[in-house]
Amino acid sequence: MCIGVPGQICAIDDNMAKVDVSGIRRDVDLTLVGVTDEHGQPRLGQWVLVHVGFAMSIINEDEARDTLEALHNMFEVEPDVGALLYGEER
């Protein structure tokens, strides 16, 4: 099973972005979703579903927050989920 983690785009440089996932900034490739939206506006501030360093899709903020809440709840009973949320730092 693959799990995507929601993150919010904080900065964009070419096809790469800094994406905040639970307070940790990660480098994420935007090639699959593009650096601009359908109106030609930069995706800054938008939420993406991240899997193995790629933004797989754009999601809305409510969906992102619901998914993060579910992952945080999972972390309470399954500590391995922490690597998804916080990276290997914790």
Image (cartoon, rainbow, N blue to C red):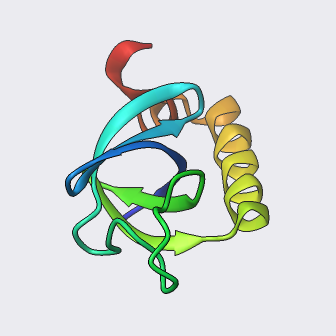
Residue at x 58%, y 25% (from the top left corner): 23
Q: Foreground residue, 68 or 54? A: 54
Q: Pick the quarter of the image with the N terminus.
A: bottom left
Q: Is residue 18 left or right of residue 5?
A: left
Residue furthest out toward the bottom: 38
- Quarter of the rendering containing residue 46: bottom right
Q: Foreground residue, 33 or 50? A: 33
- Quarter of the rendering containing residue 59: bottom right
Q: Is residue 81 left or right of residue 56?
A: right
- Quarter of the rendering containing residue 19: top left
Residue at x 67%, y 59% (from the top left corner): 64
Would residue 1 be visible to someone looking at this image?
no
Q: Is residue 41 left or right of residue 64?
A: left
Say above or below: 34 vs 13: below
Q: Pick the quarter of the image with the C terminus.
A: top left
Residue furthest out toward the top: 90
Residue at x 52%, y 53% (from the top left corner): 44
Residue furthest out toward the front: 40
Provide residue 33's location: percent of width, then percent of height: 35, 74
Provide residue 82's location: percent of width, then percent of height: 50, 30
Say above or below: 51 vs 32: above
Residue at x 48%, y 62% (from the top left corner): 43
Would residue 24 be visible to someone looking at this image?
yes
Q: Foreground residue, 78 or 18? A: 18
Say above or below: 88 vs 75: above
Provide residue 37's location: percent of width, then percent of height: 47, 77
Provide residue 7's location: percent of width, then percent of height: 53, 48
Q: How many marks?
A: 0
Q: Foreground residue, 48 or 10? A: 10
